Amino acid sequence: MRKLKEPSSKFISVRCSSCKNEQVIFGKPSSKVNCLVCNAVLAEPTGGKGRIKTQILEVLG
């Protein structure tokens, strides 16, 4: 039996620097990620890993 490869992508818990809202986002976003409360930009795509523009609280999974 072949062992499956672990995915390199993770979900990230972040806190918005404007309104302090905590939100879970994908570490490799394919589009711009905005805060659900104040609409500030939390992450931008870069072709691979996303550019996180706010405080990272925890890396999940």
Image (spheres, rainbow, N blue to C red):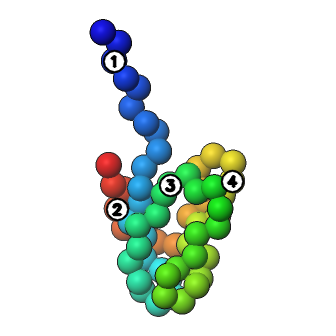
Amino acid on which the number 2 mark rests in the picture: Glu
Name the residue located 49 percent from the left edge and 88 percent from the top edge. 37
Q: Earlier in the sequence, mark 1 or mark 2?
A: 1
Q: Position of residue 11 (x, y in %)?
A: 41, 55
Residue denoted by label 1: 3
Residue denoted by label 4: 46
Secondary structure found at label 2: strand
* Disc 1 versus disc 4: nearer the observer: 1
- Where 57 sits versus 9, above or below? below
Q: Earlier in the sequence, mark 2 or mark 4?
A: 4
Q: CA distance from mark 2 to mark 4?
A: 21 Å
Nearer to me, 3 or 54:
3
Kindly indicate the quadrant of the structure image that contains residue 43: bottom right
Q: Position of residue 52 (x, y in %)?
A: 56, 64
Nearer to me, 3 or 14:
3
Amino acid on which the number 3 mark rests in the picture: Gly
Contact flag, marks 2 and 3 (Cβ < 8 Å): no
Secondary structure found at label 4: loop
- Where 3 sits versus 34, above or below? above
Q: Earlier in the sequence, mark 4 or mark 3?
A: 3
Q: Earlier in the sequence, mark 1 or mark 4?
A: 1
Q: Residues within 10 Å of mark 3 (few under 14, many from 20)?
A: many
Q: Which mark is residue 58?
A: 2
- Where 2 sits versus 44, above or below? above
Q: Which mark is residue 25?
A: none
Kindly indicate the quadrant of the structure image that contains residue 29: bottom right
Contact flag, marks 4 and 3 (Cβ < 8 Å): no
Residue denoted by label 3: 27
Secondary structure found at label 1: loop
Give the left or right position of residue 56, taking residue 3 as reference.
Answer: right
Q: Residues within 10 Å of mark 1 (few under 14, many from 20)?
A: few
Name the residue located 63 percent from the left edge and 46 percent from the top edge. 48
